[in-house]
Image: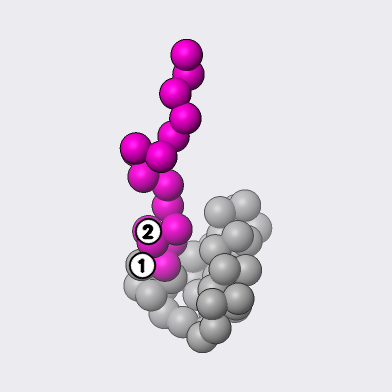
Amino acid sequence: MTSKSVATALTLYRARTLTLEQAATVGGCSTAQLEESAQAFAPTTGDAPADD
């Protein structure tokens, strides 16, 4: 599992090109590991720009 393969898998999963299971296979990790990685890259509520 490399960070590049996981990033690619997350991108394809978020684009709904792959299922979570397929993305985990592409990333060379388990679905649980992929979910953890996805949470690490998820935007936090405080990072969104204000709509003024």
Residue beneath the point at 49% across and 65% down: 20
Label 1 amino acid? Glu
Above-or-below relation of 1 to 48: below
The residue indicated by pointer 1 is 36
Residue 15 locus on image (x, y percent): 62, 52
Q: Which residues are magenta?
A: 37-52
Query: Is-magenta flag for residue 51?
Result: yes
Characterize the local packing of mark 2: few (<14), some (14-19) or many (20 or more) Cα atoms within 10 angstroms: few
Q: CA distance from mark 2 to mark 1?
A: 5 Å
Residue 12 locus on image (x, y percent): 62, 61
What colour scheme does the image use? one colour
**Res 22 visible:** no
Q: Residue 35 is drawn in which quadrant? A: bottom left
Q: Are marks 2 and 1 in contact (CB under 8 Å)?
A: yes
The residue indicated by pointer 2 is 39
Along the horizontal axis of the image, is 47 left or right of 4?
Answer: left
Above-or-below relation of 51 to 15: above
Residue beneath the point at 44% across and 34% down: 48
